[in-house]
Image (cartoon, grey):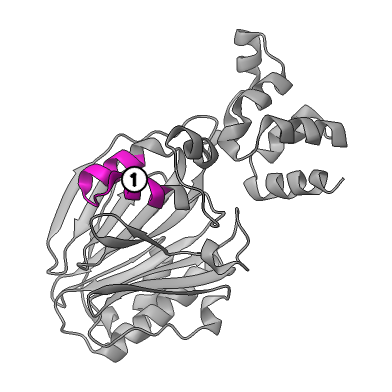
Amino acid sequence: MCALFGFLDYGKKISFLTKKKLIRELSVAAESRGTDATGIAYVKNKELTIFKKAKPAHKLSLYFPNDTVCVMGHTRMATQGSEKFNANNHPFLGCADKSFALAHNGVLYNDTILKRTENLPSTEIETDSYAAVQLIEKSQTLDFESIKDMAETVMGSFMFTILDEDNTLYFVKGSNPIYLIHFEDLGIFVYGSTKEIVQTAIMKTVLKYSKGNVINLAEGNILSISKNGEMTKNFFTFYEDIYMSRNYSGFDWACLYDEREESVEDVLLENCVNFGIEPDDVYALLDYGYEPEDIEMMFYEPKYLLECVRETNLF
């Protein structure tokens, strides 16, 4: 569980101090969903700039220039890839026909298999999220079509924000939450992963005296907001496979075994790559003493699963 937050100021009616205060309060409120790392992206002199560190937001000073149009932020709870290696933290920098930054809230379960099927280049970055950056880079274009293709290729839970060098901000809505509010009289959009994050921050700034309109986004929506505040919406087909869903706690795995006459071990071996591990890792866990049912439960907690795999590799 991570958090997204930020603003896009097209009206230029509020002061720099207010925007600085807004980002401070949004980032600290977003600590409710992650304190392992904090990062922001913004455009400076027509170039994307990313600042991120493996620290909670309240211990950082998040600097951006006073003429900044958009700040795209992220607080991280690490699930794959240590936050101590800063390249694993969000946002990530990418380059297609223009440079862009991407932040992700959620867990992608097919990133490992995508490296093979999509011929994604090797990278030192260890997070599942980075596969989304590489898919867009592979298309060599950042637009609705490339974002749509990326969103329909990855599997798992997600909410992506993407900021390009032209200060266009994209929202790509999967199953994870986003709360976006538009203060039309001030010419500013403010967003966070939850209503609580946004409202907590707003109540500590002068924005609390203005009326904002909530922009609702449904699963499968892509929304772009230009530096002039123009909104354009597009769509993609959202897939969240039953194996990868964060809501699969109620799924009856036994029905798979009955219909296909497979054991728990067979199902684990067949689907483990979607959870970031290989069949050899499943065998190692079994040899270490874990029961198939124990490993099945690990699939519900990716961070714990990877910790157990690393533990078996030490022996």
**Residue 183's image quarter?**
bottom left
Q: In front here: 198 or 24?
A: 24
**Residue 208's image quarter?**
bottom left
Callout 1 environment at 10 Å: few (<14), some (14 to 19), or many (20+)? some
**Residue at the location (60% across, 9% down)?**
259
Residue 143 belongs to the span the image colors magenta: yes
Query: From which residue to which does the magenta span run?
Result: 132-151
Question: Of the residues shown, which amino acid type is indicated by label 1?
Answer: Lys
- Does 308 sit above or below residue 262? below
Q: Secondary structure at mark 1?
A: helix
Q: In front here: 180 or 11?
A: 11
Q: Residue 234: where, in percent of width, then height?
A: 19, 44
- Does 159 sit above or below residue 40? above
**Residue at the location (79% across, 36% down)?**
285
Image-based side of 223 in relation to 102, left or right: left
Residue 25 belongs to the span the image colors magenta: no
Q: Quadrant of the N terminus?
A: bottom right
**Residue at the location (38% across, 36% down)?**
153
Q: In front here: 91 or 23?
A: 91
Identify the residue under disc 1: 138
**Residue at the location (83% across, 34% down)?**
290
Q: Residue 281: where, in percent of width, then height?
A: 73, 36
Work out whether residue 205 can be spotted: no
